[in-house]
Image: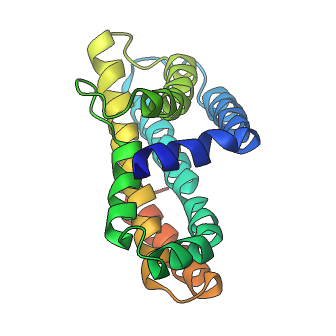
Amino acid sequence: LLTRRQTQLILRDRPALAAKYGGAVFQALIAGSAFYNQQYTTNSAFTFGGAAFLSILFMSLQGLAELTNQYQLRPILVRHQGFSFYRMSAFALSQVLIDAVSWTERLVAFADRFTACYRGIILVFSVILYFLVNLKRTAGQFFIFWLFLWIVSMTTYALFRCLAAITPSLDVATRFSGLLIQAIVVYAGYTLA
């Protein structure tokens, strides 16, 4: 029930979904043009890392938008909890299930359309960036790149949802999210020399 409700909420906000797609295409074109058509030499090793770092950073910043979504839903969730419609943990679990529906098992046929849309955002970004940068053009390496970006985006979405759940206000959550983004940037393993 909650997975269907969550899917309906997301699909109802078509401008936000279109903005995510547009932002992914725009960022991929910008980052891809910055690292355009790299050659396979030792001099390009640093730029390949830069392209990978920018893709991880973009996926992390996509998860940052989850803070405002969680705070917009909070009054409704508190009201539903007061009426004993469902537990908050069930709502959180439904969000995770919607984000990471198994590829072999389909929870709800309606939910499958959303997960295809969300994986589509990552896929569009990955295809544009991967081939503009001229990374190794094999299917296995492309899908590893895509899978890694998908895992990064799912974990940052979960991280910012958790932050929204444990902080009392959006102001406090925004402060902590700034620190978390800094930690992601510093500890991502990529340094500028």
Q: Is residue 146 left or right of residue 23?
A: left
Q: Is residue 25 above or below residue 72?
A: above
Tell which of 38 and 73 is nearer to you: 73
Residue extending furthest right? 15
| Residue 71 point in image, percent of width and height | 61, 73
Query: At 42% across and 28% down in the image, what residue appears?
Result: 112
Q: Is residue 161 above or below residue 5?
A: below
Tell which of 178 and 165 is nearer to you: 165
Residue extending furthest left? 104
| Residue 9 point in image, percent of width and height | 60, 48
Tell which of 77 and 122 is nearer to you: 77
Query: At 40% across and 44% down in the image, what residue appears?
Result: 98
Q: Is residue 43 visible?
A: yes
| Residue 130 point in image, percent of width and height | 49, 22
Q: Coloring scheme of the render? A: rainbow
Query: At 23% across and 23% down in the image, what residue appears?
Result: 104
Q: Is residue 6 above or below residue 160?
A: above
Q: Is residue 32 above or below residue 81?
A: above
Query: At 32% across and 69% down in the image, what residue appears?
Result: 89
Q: Which quadrant of the structure image shows residue 135?
A: top left
